[in-house]
Amino acid sequence: MMNIAAVEPQNVLAIIVIGLIAGWLASLIGGGGGLLRDLVTGLVGSLVGGLILHAFGVVLPIASPFVADVVMSTLGAVIVVAVARTLA
């Protein structure tokens, strides 16, 4: 498990960038929202996507770790948007 205190500043920036990209892509698929909503959706989607893919043992066959993280986060963000719309 990752030690939160040991997270480097550049990693935090990468997580935010991936969250923004994933949230933006999810908003294109499931409906728009704005910068803050896209960021939150992308960050939550990163967690959801990672948990779901890990639970099912899915490994994305993508060579670039950055692109794989964006795809995983986008899948999670789309799921988050779908669940939020279902509950609303």
Image (cartoon, helix red, strand yellow):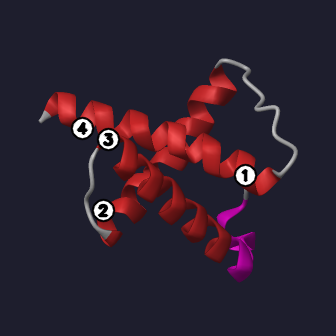
Residue 61, quarter of the rendered image: top right
How far apart marks 4 and 3 lie (CA) works out to 11 Å
The answer to whether the residue labelled 4 contacts the one labelled 3, judged by CB atoms less than 8 Å apart, is no
How far apart marks 1 and 3 lie (CA) works out to 20 Å
Q: Earlier in the sequence, mark 1 or mark 4?
A: 1
Q: Look at the numbered disc 3 and give the secondary structure of its residue.
A: helix
Mark linked to residue 85 = none
The answer to whether the residue labelled 1 contacts the one labelled 4, judged by CB atoms less than 8 Å apart, is no
The residue under label 3 is 30
Q: Amino acid at mark 2?
A: Arg
The residue under label 1 is 67
The answer to whether residue 68 is magenta is no
The quadrant of the picture occupied by the C terminus is top left
Q: Look at the numbered disc 2 and give the secondary structure of its residue.
A: helix
The residue under label 4 is 84
Between tags 3 and 2, which lies in front? Answer: 3
Residue span colored magenta: 3-11
Q: Look at the numbered disc 1 and give the secondary structure of its residue.
A: helix
Mark linked to residue 37 = 2
The answer to whether residue 10 is magenta is yes
How far apart marks 1 and 4 lie (CA) works out to 25 Å
> Which class describes the residues within 10 Å of circle 3: few (<14), some (14-19), or many (20+)?
some
Closest to the observer: 76 or 54?
A: 76
Between tags 1 and 4, which lies in front? Answer: 1
